[in-house]
Each structure stands twice: as C-alpha cells, then as structure tokens.
Image: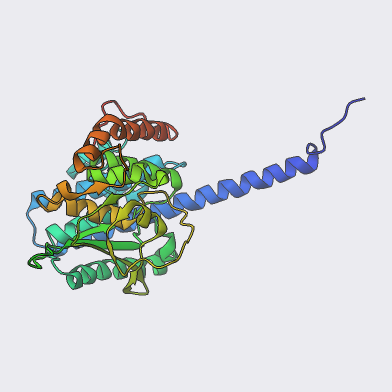
Amino acid sequence: MNFVHQNQGPGHAAVQDAQSRMLAEREERCKSQLQMSGNLFIKHFLKLLTQKKLAEDIKKHYIEKVLHAVFFFGRLHKRMVKPVDFLGPKTCQIMQAKFPRPFEQYSTHLPSLTPYSILLQFGTEEAGCSTQEQMESFLRDFNETLQEELEQEANLKPSQFVFRAAVVSFSIYRDPGDGAATPLFYGASLSCSGLLERKIMIAILCLQTWHKAVAFAVHHGENDLAIVFPDGVQSRAFYYMHGAFVEKEPCVKCRKMFKVDFRPPAGSATENSRWPYGNCAENESLSKLLQGVPGLQERVVSTHTPPQPNTYQAIEQEFADVIENSFRYHLVQLLQKRHFFSHLPLQFF
C-alpha cells in the first residue's frame, strides 16, 4: 500500500503557492522601495549640487560617486534594479552621456562609501559644515525636502527609504593637557537595506575605507575584543526623528567594540541589536578621527591580554596577517551570492 506523506497533497501545495506569492510580493515591494529611494536620493543630491557654486570637476566627482553607489545596490538586489529603472529612459540617456563611468563600472567595481556617507563627506568638504549646528542644519534641510516628496509622491514612510541613515555620530579629540580640540569627524549608520547588503558593505568599508583599528574591532566583535582610545577622545551619536536630532546612547555592540568616552555615557540597557557589527555610525566617525589626527592612532591599544601584544603596531600586524584576508575572502563569498563576480584583485570605484 502506498502512503502519502501527511505534508503532501492539495492542501500542502496550496500553502506553498501562497507562501511563494507572499515572498514574490515582498521582494517586488522591496524592489519598488529601492527604485524610488535611489531616484529620490539622486534627484535631491543633484539639486544640492546645483545650489552650491562648485567647480565642475568637484560636481562631477560627487555625482559619479552617488550614481555608482546607488547603481551598485540596485545590482546587488535580489530583483536587480538597473540604472534606467532608477532614472527613467530620458534622464538615463543624458546622464550616461555626461557621466559614463558609473554606468560602466557598477557591476565590476565596489563603492567605498554608502550614499548618505557621501552626503556627509560633501557637507564637511564642500558645504562648509564645521560646527555641529551647521551639520545638523545641512542634514535637516536635505532630510526634510526628501521626506516631503517621499510622503506626497512616493507614498513611502521615512523608515522605508532605503538610503536613510537613522543615526549620525561625531567624534572629537580634546587634548587633556591644554584643552585644544580637533574638528568634528562625522559618520553615518549604514544607509542601505538588506542583511546581505549590509554585510557586503561592512566588509568593503573594513578593507577599503575605515581605519585598520576600527576594522580590527569589527572583526573581533563576536570575541569581545575591543580597541581602547586615549583620554580626550569623545563620541556622540544622534537619532534623527520628527525633524530633530536627538542624542542617543551607544548600543551594546559599540560598547563592546570601542572603549571610549561616549556622551551621553552608556546606560545599563542590554538591548538585543539586530544589525551586524560595523553597522553603527560610530565606526565611520571614529575611523575618520584616527585618520585625521596625526599621532593619535599610535596611542590606541587593544584589549588583548598577555602574552598577546596589545599595541597599535600589533593591531596593524594582525590586520596585515589575518584580518585583511579574512574580510576579502568573506566579501567575495557574499558577492557571489548575488552573482557579482568581481575580478581579483578587487576593484574599487
């Protein structure tokens, strides 16, 4: 006698069909959100550039970086979003003629920043944001103009905007001796969606963009190994909500990775953060601080215990011997899941 497995039959097939439809609808919805998010980010970034009196080569530099980053995430998406999908046929033809490189290289080269981090870089380097108030005003203006169109035309909630950075952080070094302070160094949380995309971007940043000490902390996140900053380094983070920046305590993962003077101080909360190590804004801002303040990196140590050395030189050595290759291997594996076969050595835009 033939027995039919209890999970098989018409009822089981109907459940499977329903689940497949729901999955397809969710993927299509995510694709639509990515497409609209990319279109709006590019559009408003171009508006921002036209408002500033900049040299044409500087404008071109930023336009190309934003286009490439957005196109790259379209390429990575499970249901690929092509440049023409983001821009529309007419605009795509015009932009491709003026800026061919992003269109040619989004499937072969990797970005070194997420879109919102490019915006932060523009705010510091070209928009003249040297104080906290200036940067917050700059970002608030950009966020508000974007949000109006999100709600009115795209029917998207702010949380559904793919290239949104929920948190912005700044780091600063004040010399304990004379109180002299460095400029503010800004960072944004990862402005991309999807766990795989975030993991890919974190690996890219650790290889190409962030300071080696920060890459060390990300690599060892699960091992409770941290990097320790010298006295005088402060880190502050802000959550953007309802048109204002609200001060935010560091999350559990940042507290594990960085031994630094957080303002406000870390509380006793033990929230279960769902994002991967390296997602937070503190990674970028602390990295920029180490890269921007001469002599500061040599004073960073790790929490390695003897007999393992914990000096900055040991951090650099471990990066060269182990960490760099680990991130590179991990990145290639992740990219292959989206059939993105980057040539070795990896090429960056």
Q: Is residue 281 above or below residue 80?
A: below
Residue 80, percent from left and from top:
42, 41
Q: Furthest-front residue in view? A: 307
Quarter of the picture containing the N terminus is top right
Quarter of the picture containing the C terminus is top left
Instruction: Judge whether residue 94 can be spotted in this image.
Output: no
Residue 310, percent from left and from top:
26, 42
Residue 4, percent from left and from top:
84, 32
Residue 328, image quadrant: top left
Q: How is the image coloured?
A: rainbow
Q: Is residue 131 left or right of residue 2?
A: left
Q: Is residue 186 above or below residue 1?
A: below
Q: Is residue 151 left or right of residue 175?
A: right
Residue 220, percent from left and from top:
36, 43
Residue that appears at 7% across and 67% down: 178
Residue that appears at 74% across and 40% down: 13
Q: Is residue 114 above or below residue 49?
A: above
- How many numbered marks have been drawn onto this rendered protein structure? 0
Q: Furthest-right residue in view? A: 1
Q: Is residue 162 left or right of residue 312?
A: right
* 267 or 203, nearer to the observer: 267
Q: Is residue 149 left or right of residue 62?
A: right
Residue 75, image quadrant: top left
Instruction: Judge whether residue 57 can be spotted in this image.
Output: yes
